[in-house]
Amino acid sequence: MSRKMIPDTFFSKLEEEARHYPVNCFRLANGAKGPLGLLLVTENRSGHEIESAVAALGLSRPGLGKKTTKTATAEQADQLGREDLLQLLSIELDRVHRTRLPCALLLLDISKKGGPTRKQKEQLMAQAVPPLSDALHQIDLFSLDGQNHFALILPGTNVGKARNRAKEIQQIINHTDFSLAEKKITPTATMGIAVCHAYDTLSASQLLDMAAEELDRALKSGPDSICHYSADRREDSCQVTVEERAQLFSFLQKDTA
């Protein structure tokens, strides 16, 4: 059965329909061969998230055709990226207090020696998306921090496990082919980690700020450094549920009776 050719008017009608909904519409171009299709992205998504999605599809940025709705400035896109991350963190911090399991936030800076331009940074980040996505565990959350860094939320992860994951990520970056201006390079992967425990009273913005401080400390320490913060009060393995604590108290009361 032969397929009909898709006329350009078909895409135009879809673009017109998209204007009535809170979405941004991109036409995916393929040079003289005509359009590849349309990419619909919900409003208020950052430019970096769109870049990541395009990279995950195996398309390059030049493959994007004209945008049919207004675009955000770089500063607005960064702010939206931070807001999205804070929403995810708030959900996970609530889960920490319900499950009594820790949650780690890992901020990852992909760069190159000598310091990249913003455009080069975005190119490196886009190239890092596929290998990083493959390395994520099923419950991990992958986002951006609004400051041109990747943010990985690792539920149920204490500081020791988070450091191990950070080292795994460095290995992945080191074994992935990156290029800038058609020249192969080995980028640096510098990370800052902050962990929230059930006994902590941290807001999402506080945890993000702590991770950002650790990333800043790591960047000052040198390329590929990993710095972390975690409260020293109790080991993660010592955290128990409310039911387990009640049972423990009942045993103690019997012993003292």
Image (cartoon, rainbow, N blue to C red):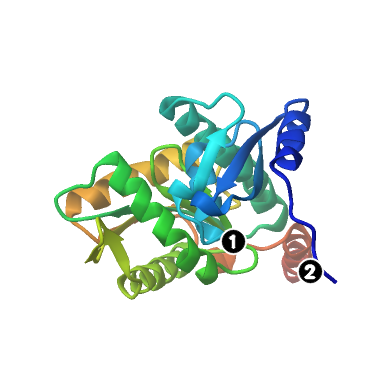
Visible residue check, residue 195:
no
Residue found at x 40% / y 68%: 169
Which one is nearer the viewer's eye here, 25 or 90?
25
Which one is nearer the viewer's eye here, 120 or 17?
17
Q: Which residue position holds label 2?
A: 254
Q: Quadrant of the C terminus?
A: bottom right
Where residue 129 sits in the image (x, y, percent)?
47, 59
Considering only order in the chain, which callout, 1 or 2, is on the residue closer to the N terminus?
1
Visible residue check, residue 37:
yes
Indicate which label's residue lies in the foreground, 2 or 1.
1
Which one is nearer the viewer's eye here, 77 or 184?
184
Quick one: which residue is furthest to the right in this view?
1
Residue found at x 47% / y 43%: 48
**The quarter of the displayed image where residue 184 is located:** bottom left
Which one is nearer the viewer's eye here, 153 or 255?
153
Q: Quadrant of the N terminus?
A: bottom right
Label 2: which secondary element: helix
Where residue 246 sits in the image (x, y, percent)?
77, 60
Label 2 crowd bin: few (<14), some (14–19), many (20+), radius 10 Å = few
* Residue 140 marker: 1
Q: Amino acid at mark 2?
A: Lys
Q: Is residue 115 left or right of residue 161?
A: left
Residue found at x 75% / y 57%: 242
Q: Amino acid at mark 1?
A: Asp
Residue found at x 67% / y 49%: 97
Q: CA distance from mark 2 to mark 1?
A: 42 Å
